[in-house]
Amino acid sequence: MLDKTIYAKIRRRTRETLGFSVNPHRFRRAAATLWSNRDPANVRGVKDLLGHASFNTTETHYIMAQSRVAGVLLLE
C-alpha cells in the first residue's frame, strides 16, 4: 500500500469508530505521552520507539504530558 492509502484508511476507520478522524501521527504522539505518564523514569526509550536521533526531538515535539499538566494548573 502507498503511504497516502494507509493514511486515508486509518483516518476513515477512526472516523467510523470514534466519530472523528485520527491521523497516524497522533498515534505517535499518544504513545510518547502515555509512556511519559506511565513510566517517567524510562521516558528516554520513547526516542527509540519513534526512531529519533536525539531525545530533544522527542521531548520537544511528542511528549505532551507537561503541556497537559500546565493546562490543568491554569484551570485551577
Image: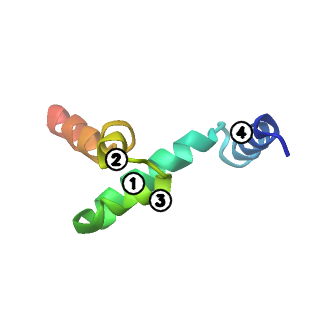
Q: Are marks 3 and 1 in contact (CB under 8 Å)?
A: yes
- Camera-near label (2 vs 3) is 2
18 vs 22, nearest the viewer: 22
Q: CA distance from mark 4 to mark 2?
A: 29 Å
User: Which residue in the rendered view is the most extreme toward the right?
Assistant: 1
Instruction: Tell whether 23 sits left or right of 75.
Output: right
Crowd class of label 3 (few under 14; some 14 to 19; many from 20; radius 10 Å): few
Instruction: Tell whether 23 sits left or right of 40.
Output: right
* Above or below for 56 versus 47: above
58 vs 63, nearest the viewer: 58
| Residue 26 x %, y % | 53, 42
- Camera-near label (2 vs 1) is 2
Compare marks 2 and 3 and give the one earlier in the sequence.
Answer: 3
**Residue ID for mark 2:** 54
Q: Are marks 2 and 1 in contact (CB under 8 Å)?
A: yes
- Camera-near label (4 vs 1) is 1
**Residue ID for mark 1:** 47
| Residue 5 x %, y % | 82, 38
- Camera-near label (4 vs 2) is 2
Residue type at tag 3: Leu
Quarter of the image for the C terminus: give it: top left
**Residue ID for mark 3:** 49
Q: Secondary structure at mark 3?
A: helix
Crowd class of label 1 (few under 14; some 14 to 19; many from 20; radius 10 Å): some
- Name the residue: 24% across, 43% down: 66
Compare marks 2 and 1 and give the one earlier in the sequence.
Answer: 1
46 vs 75, nearest the viewer: 46
**Residue ID for mark 4:** 11
Residue type at tag 1: Lys
